[in-house]
Amino acid sequence: MASSPRLPLSRLLVSLQVGMSLLLLAGAGLFIRTLRQLSAVDLARLRENIAAIPSVESAAMSQHGLTQGVESDASVHAPGFRPADKG
């Protein structure tokens, strides 16, 4: 009787690990490319385009971007908004 060759479990797991690593590397490369493209966006023009949308009442810009490592503990208050009671 001829039996089909079977891969040991360890070889299968290594193959899966290599495949997942390649997938993660590809995703990281796409993420870095996206961040580079976003850094080239003209934010002033983007703000003007967003403010031109009829349903937008106002638009603002921040001095610090999300990826610049700047932290703030300032509160944000929206006029007319009342948070739900905690309890």
Image (tube, rainbow, N blue to C red):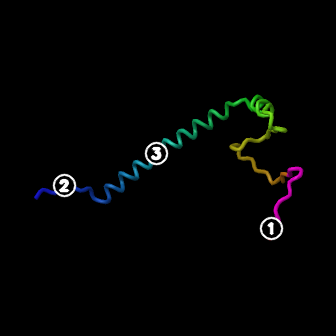
The magenta span reads: 77-85
Residue type, label 2: Ser
> Looking at the picture, how far across and down is residue 22, in whole percent?
44, 45
Mark 2 or 1, nearer chain start = 2
- Cβ atoms under marks 3 and 2 closer than 8 Å: no
Q: Which residue is mark 3?
A: 23
Which one is closest to the eye, mark 1 or mark 3? 1
Question: Which quarter of the image is occupied by the C terminus?
Answer: bottom right
Residue type, label 3: Leu
Circle 2 sits in a helix, a strand or a loop, which is it? loop
What residue is shown at x 69% (from left), y 31% (from top)?
A: 41
Q: Which residue is mark 2?
A: 4
> Looking at the picture, how far across and down is residue 72, in whole percent?
79, 51
Q: Magenta stretch mostly in which secondary structure?
A: loop
What residue is shown at x 62% (from left), y 34% (from top)?
A: 36
Q: How many marks?
A: 3
What residue is shown at x 78% (from left), y 33% (from top)?
A: 53
23 part of magenta stretch: no
Question: Which quarter of the image is occupied by the N terminus?
Answer: bottom left
Structural crowding at the residue carrying mark 3, measured as other residues with C-alpha within 10 Å and reported as few (<14), some (14–19) or many (≥20): few
Quadrant of the rendered image containing residue 33: top right
Q: Which residue is mark 1?
A: 86
Circle number at residue 75: none
Residue that lies at the very extreme toward the front in this rendered image = 54
Which one is closest to the eye, mark 3 or mark 2? 2
Q: CA distance from mark 3 to mark 2?
A: 30 Å
Mark 1 or 3, nearer chain start = 3
Q: CA distance from mark 1 to mark 3?
A: 43 Å
Query: Does residue 68 appear left or right of residue 4 in this picture?
Result: right
